[in-house]
Image (spheres, rainbow, N blue to C red):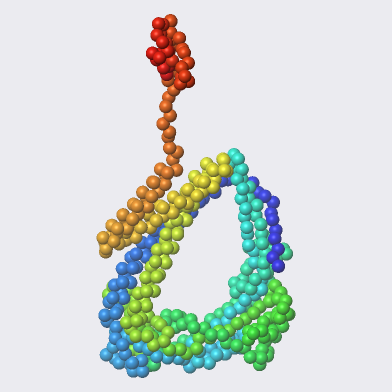
Amino acid sequence: MATLYTDDTSKQSWNAHTKDYFKNIVFGTLLLSFSFMVLFWNEGNVISQIQTLEEAEQEVVSIDANQVDLFNEGKLIHLSGPAITNEILIDEIFKIDANDVIKLRRIVEMYQWQERQHPESKGLLGGKGTITMTYIYDKVWSSEYINSKKKFKHFLNHKNPPMPMKGKEFIAEHVNLGEFTLSTGIVKQFSNYQHLPIENFQIQGLQDISDNKVSLKFGDFYIGKDPAYNPQIGDLRVRFEIVPPTTVSIIAKQSDSDLIPYQTRAAGKIELFEYGTVDAETMFKHARIFNNNFIWFLRLVGFLLVFVGLGIIFQVFRILATVMPFFNSVINYFTWFAAFTFALTFTFDTIAAAWLYYRPLAAIILMLISLVFLFILKGMQNITKPKEKNVQQPVAPQPMSDGQRAVMVPSGHAVMVKPGLTPEAAVPIK
């Protein structure tokens, strides 16, 4: 069950707001600079990846994995088959060994306190404000140690003991595909982990690793007094997983009997890996899809960095709103809308600048799109401006000379009548 603490409300002056916004401007500027580097590097990488894959697809040679042909030395080759090893991976702490597996990993989780913070701010007239902070403490299983003494506001009643052990991964040094040996980079990509259940006999002789009882729960080690229904702070649960031998397809450079990354003339490297028996054409197709998705992911990351950076910088306008808090939400929405529009413009222009040399037509189109967003922002500004109404100025009544008089006629208007004239010949008074 979670516990809550609410601290006393702290006050913020107008000067404190100003200092905070100045820090935000510096941080927002740094985000903009970093986003520019991410976007520009990503677009340059697009060209390199396209050229690398096109060159590699033209040069790749499919071979039999069970025979090393010296004629293919230094070439880019494609091969499929079972990836196997005859090594034994051992976890010395828990005395767990796994034969003929490519990877063995130990996952350790500890039951510990976690702090969550919930700030609530309120603006006051004159630029002042208040912040009320609520601290929420939950019990969670986590593989990362949470240092309660350094990170918690109220740590006296929420102490996490030191984590006695952490997770670890064991990797076979030699993994073979037929007569070839896979590189470390390829082996690290193996991720088809399977649960390794612990047997009862494997728990013997483990009481010396902890003061608490070591037992089994769903095929995993449990270190604690009551593993069934009542976990306590500091209890551990340890799970083991393995990567067994599996069929894979590889595209890499042949160096004797080793498979290593292939350097292309386009300055890119090729080292492709997939599970199962996959032909070279399909592997290159999948590589293009993956690269395209990754490129768009980085573009999205770059845009979000620009958006957040500009949004933080534009929050400086809220300094004026702190004097009258009821304007705060209006200015807040407008600043984030402006940040969104300028972020799109900045992102498109950065991408266009990177593509200007290689694909000028695409660059020009992106620049035109960015101008459209600027016109949209300009239109929003015109909409928000109050429209001026044409009000007719009142005309002062003309003074009447001697002998003139004002007479009310049936129409309800006052008219001016000269001496000797009937009201029908009167002149209306304006």
Residue shown at 72%/76% (left/top)? 230
Q: Is residue 241 visible?
A: yes
Closer to the camera, 344 or 410? 410
Is 360 situated above or below 160? above
Closer to the camera, 97 or 356? 356
Closer to the camera, 95 or 12? 12
Residue shown at 61%/43% (left/top)? 124
The quarter holding residue 94 reads bottom right
Q: Position of residue 240 (x, y in %)?
A: 58, 84
Is 348 situated above or below 408? below
Residue shown at 69%/85% (left/top)? 215
Q: Position of residue 393 (x, y in %)?
A: 43, 24
Q: Position of residue 98 (x, y in %)?
A: 55, 90
Is 426 situated above or below 215? above
Residue shown at 37%/80% (left/top)? 272
Q: Is residue 212 left or right of residue 287?
A: right
